[in-house]
Image: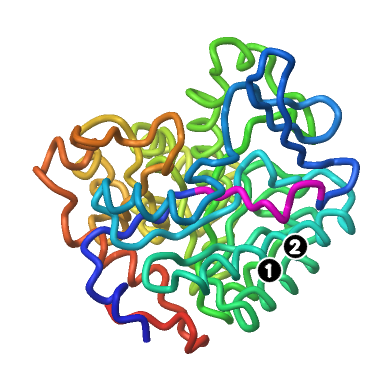
Amino acid sequence: MNCAIKTARVIDVHAHVVLARTIGAAGVFGPYIGTNEDGSPYFQVGESYRLNGVRYVGSPFMEAELRLARMAERGIDYQVLSPNPLTYLHFIPAKDAARYCQVHNDALAEVVRAHPERLGGLAALPIQSPDAAAEELQRAVKELGLLGAAFGTDAPNPLDAPCMDRLYEKASALGVPLFIHPGPAGIDGPAGDPALKRFELDIIAGFAAQETLAIATLIFGGVLDRHPKLDICISHGGGATALLIGRMARAARLRHWSPAALRPDGAFEERARRLWLDVHVEHPAAIELLSSVVGRDHLVYGTNFAGWDEPTAGKPSNVEARHGNVPDFLAGNARQLLASRHNPITQLAV
């Protein structure tokens, strides 16, 4: 059993990784890394999506030693690495996605094995094929020792589609969590709302909308009722859920399409409390606000490590601004979320 994670005071569950071995692993879909004529870096997926100005090579995203040094600087004891949302590749052919995810997860497992006292990993999944996703989750957990899986809010199959039950059954049987995080629309799938292309609103506001829709879909669509042992964590505090839960609960009680199981008072809220939320939101009262939705025991710490909105070194994060430090209970919650009930490799003490 990993002694470091048992004693870690700060566990970061929201940290993306870019792996050198995955460059070009999806064939014509990339991803590609290159340099523009002006010397600035770019990261490209497929023929049309290009992220300019973000340097992955020589950064904590790709260099484990740089990541570990930055973690020490930020006071993060243990970090759970998840796929880069730009490379979910949920809309490409399933065979290409499955091959890419295998390469990704093999490479991620190597990074984690090299630094087991500081790093864990969540597998990438070919979510467009729930059967293939379930198989890859089994391999990633049982053979590679990864802690669970992460995928996007937007995919060909809605989160409550019957075909997705295969994946949820597998995660429940393995006792591992699924981390659901948005990706910008239009990378390899539908373009999405053009209004969100201005001012990077797809990231600033669109992500929150996707997370809120994900939670509504999981509850209204009966996923949590069909899979009572399933653990799902939603990024960025679940988007706008904390503000809209009263409205969603009222709809559950009153609207004609609402399932009978959600009509009793408190039924919607009860299911919301089964979800896990990371507290990577900007308002310093995040813990109190989110505690009212899912309860304090279902909150975990997250940073979007090395991303544009990562807490700045030397300045308090949203949580620290309110509490003076990162509360110990968040690490205890993370240990509970990440503790596999069936895989000795990943069993953690709470």
Task: Using residue 224 as the reference point, say whether residue 257 is left or right of it.
Answer: right
Q: Which residue is mark 2?
A: 103
Mark 2 Cα within 10 Å, few/some/many (few <14, many 20+)? some
Rendering quarter of residue 94 = bottom right
Task: Using residue 197 as the reference point, say whether residue 325 is left or right of it.
Answer: left
What residue do we see at 52% from left, 51% from top?
A: 63
Q: Is residue 55 above or below residue 229?
A: above
Q: The residue under label 2 is which amino acid type?
A: Val
For this rendering, which residue is in front, 341 or 291? 341
Q: Percent from the top left, x then y, of residue 235? A: 45, 45
Q: Quadrant of the C terminus?
A: bottom left
Q: What SS does tag 2 mark?
A: helix
Q: Is residue 40 above or below residue 322?
A: above
Q: Is residue 195 above or below residue 275?
A: above
Q: Percent from the top left, x then y, of residue 45? A: 77, 35
What residue do we see at 37% from left, 36% from top?
A: 310
What residue do we see at 55% from left, 72% from top?
A: 146
Asked if the residue at tag 1 contacts the one at tag 2, i.e. Cβ–Cβ closer than 8 Å, the answer is yes
